[in-house]
Amino acid sequence: MSTGTSAAAPALVRGPALRRAARRRRFAFYGPAFVAAVAYVDPGNFATNVQAGARHGYLLVWVLVAACAVAMFIQYLSAKTGLATGRDLPTLCRDNFPRPVVRGLWVQAEIVAMATDLAEFVGAAIGLYLLLEVPMLPAALITAVVSFAILALQQRGYRPFELVIVFLLSIIALGFAYTVIAAGGQSASGLTAGMVPEFHGTDSVVLAIGIIGATVMPHVIYLHSALTAQRQRPRGSAERRRALRTLRVDTMAGLSLAGLINLSMLCVAAAVFYGTAGDFDGSLASAHEDFGRLVGGGAALAFAAALLASGLSSSGVGTYSGQVIMEGFLRIRVPLFLRRAVTMAPALAVLGLGVSPDTVLLMSQVVLSFGIPFALVPLVLLSRRRDLMGDLVNRRVTTFVGWVAALLISGINAYLLQQVFFG
């Protein structure tokens, strides 16, 4: 009798301990989507959403909502691939595609990463200029120092880096929550009409492409799979399924927050700037000035603080993505600080030459849109393979939706080229 009791006691102790360990492993899968979400509210989003609202009112709301829905699906697919395989997307491409294809994918991914870095670095410098009136080039150098400090957190593991990124994301969200409340005057009928798909001329098409490029970010498709693959691997099929449910919740929460921030940007610009006779010229500096004049100093301050937080956080995420891209495709590991120093050079050159930062931001987002299919098509091809994904392999409907998203984005890009060169 005593032997049975003594044998049962350790089992009773082990039961709660095992459940706590399982909860800790499941909790580890919360966070990657919020890091990815930062890339969806980077300075390029500020430029495209503010200009879309100012020039066309609520016309492109449907583009933004559709892009956010597609982004949520793609990021979930990327996270699931990292969970199932324990490898990031660039590494999977290197291991499963012919070498010429891998090299081509790496070249375009590097172009995308540079365009991303350019937008984020320039955006942070603009935010610092608007807050403290620091000239653009010194603001860029200060941004570089802060960016290095954020990157240094990665040496302490993924959690400290993620917590700082989430803190900066919270500043962006609070900044626009305040701006929406301060601006007021939102049109329910305008929002409803904006859900009807239509364009008004080539300018609206270009802005729509920019919104898609700023919302569905190709470099963070690569990163999300890496962030998930870094976690502790689940033990067994049941735990893997629970981890997948956690990733689904994480993705829905993180990308929904990013979508709401983006929608607030467009709606505030539509309410404040559209149809007015003001001096707004589409630049972020002009938006900041007009927010102060038309809404109040608090709204202008909130806008500038959100822009600075956006640039700093997305800059760190972009550099991390570039490391994943290079290491995955080429098996070459470059120190993050060296990569940061190299990739910020184009931004410093742009600011030093006096090129319009707002033009750079907008066109960088168009470049990003053209890079989406090059990340999405390999993701769909690989995630439908049972030999790689095991019991987390795509269902047929998931693969079908992935192909539809890739074809739609490619079709819109082709339409833009036709309008620009032959329209």
Image (cartoon, rainbow, N blue to C red):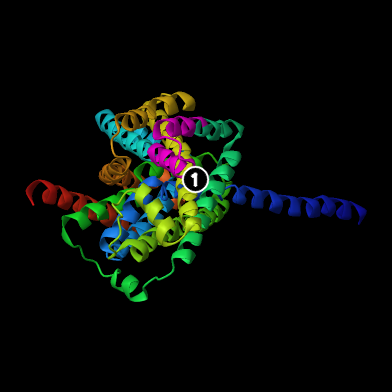
**Residue most extreme to the left:** 422
Which amino acid, by three-letter code, is at mark 1?
A: Ala
- Determine crowd level at label 1: few under 14, some 14-19, many 20+ residues with C-alpha closer than 10 A: many
Instruction: Give, as a single range, the part of the protein colored magenta.
Output: 120-145
Q: Is residue 142 magenta?
A: yes
Of 3 and 188, nearer the camera is 188
Q: Which residue is mark 1?
A: 309
Question: In the picture, residue 400 is in which quadrant?
Answer: bottom left
Up-down relation of residue 280 to residue 159 (above or below): below
Q: Quadrant of the N terminus?
A: bottom right
Tally of numbered discs: 1
Of 320 and 177, nearer the camera is 177
Question: In the picture, residue 291 is in which quadrant?
Answer: bottom left
- Is 9 positioned to the left or the right of 131 in the image? right
Up-down relation of residue 231 to residue 266 (above or below): above
**Residue most extreme to the bottom:** 189
Up-down relation of residue 346 to residue 67 (above or below): above
Magenta stretch, main secondary structure, is helix
Residue 412: x and y in percent read 20, 53
Of 112 and 180, nearer the camera is 180
Q: Residue at horizontal 56%, vertical 55%? A: 242
